[in-house]
Amino acid sequence: MRIFLLMSEKKQKLSSLSRLALIGAAALAVAGCKEEARQAEPPRAVKTTVAQYSSPARVLRYSGVIRPRIESALGFRVSGKLMERLVNTGDRVEQGQVLARIDPVDLKLAEAAQQANVDAAKTRLAVAKSALERSKRLLASNFTSQAAYDSAKLEVDSAQGALEAAEAQLRQNANQVSYAELRANAAGVITAVNAEPGQVVSTGQAVVTMAETEEVEVAVAVPENELASIRVGAPATATLWADASVSAEGRIREIAGAADSATRTYAVRIGLPSPPPQMRLGMTAAVLLKTPAKPELKAPLTALAQIDGKPVLWIVDPATNTVAPREVTLGDLADDGVRVLSNLTEGEIIVSAGVQFLTPGQQVRIAAPSNPSIAERR
């Protein structure tokens, strides 16, 4: 009986071992099938992009004031009593238009007096020439000396010089009479009035202030951190704050050499050669300045993945068409992706979609190759 029990136990142990062997063989067979299936899996199709430096234009926006490029304080070139002022603040004037007049009586009297001096100089010259002719005839007949003839000739030369000086002074007096009228030297608009009729004004004293309207400009204040990105001659666009449909193209005409002591900003002038009539002096305008940005590498947001909490990009090896993750340093977000600051080289191929299904060393197939650019390959 004991022998029978021992034989039964041995049979049960052999049966258990057989079952374990069968289970192990089945597991190995399944693992082998999975490995064969993985090896037989075709390369995964992925979308890619090529890392390439780009220099997109940055747009800077500032508020400014429309002002004239040339604004002059106009005054008489002679002194006198202001008789009439023909313009008021806000009036538009044309080139050569009379703006004001002073009393010309004293100026005309000075001109008349100088005219008398010119007439006297002409008479003196005529007498001197007649005396010279007589001396010349007498000298030919030996009735006068050479010294007397030379003295007569000198008198003619002196009278001729006096006449020329008197005529020059007469022209100056005539000019002063014309200076009694203050005229606009260009088309513009009167922005200020500084004198009233009855007032005695001195030479050069401002009577009116006129802004020329042939060319206007927009004055803006640029902070010092953006000064290096702008330059004289760069294009700009000015748009009215009151009416966004009114705009004008211009260029940076002037950049201040020193910052304002109060605001620590730099005054920048944008010239508008052909402003629309709706742009009036003193209006507020928005100015857009396009400036080149620093060359940078970008990656699409869909290309980003994380491994151990660190950002990575999947890089395609063009020789083997396999992928490998690479840790990178990211910068700020851009309109078309995120800036990559380090550990990425221009020309490298980045997987831009489907990164969550990739494993290191996996073979991939580019869906549709395109020219190398920062845009996605389709």
Image (cartoon, rainbow, N blue to C red):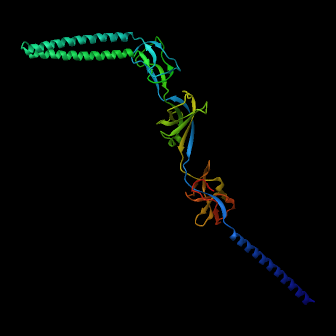
**Where residue 262 appears, x then y in whole percent?**
53, 33
Q: Is residue 329 left or right of residue 6?
A: left
| Residue 73 coordinates in the image, percent (x, y) | 46, 22
- Left or right of 81? Residue 309 is right
Q: Which of 311/365 is in front?
A: 365
**Drawn side of residue 318 relative to residue 156, left or right:** right
In this rendered view, identify the residue nearer to me: 240 or 15.
240
Number of numbered discs overlaid on the protein picture: 0
Q: Is residue 308 visible?
A: no
Residue 115 position (above or below residue 371) = above
Q: Position of residue 332 (x, y in %)?
A: 61, 49
Query: Which quadrant holds the N terminus?
Result: bottom right
Which residue sits at x=86%, y=85%? 11
Position of the C terminus by quadrant = bottom right
User: In the figure, 288 relative to 91: above or below?
Assistant: below
Residue found at the far right of this picture: 1
| Observer able to see residue 21 | yes
Which residue: 14% across, 15% down? 151
Left or right? Give the position of 141 relative to 193: left
Q: Residue at x 90, y 90 (%)?
A: 3
Whole-percent x and y of residue 149? 12, 15
Q: Which image quadrant for residue 166?
A: top left
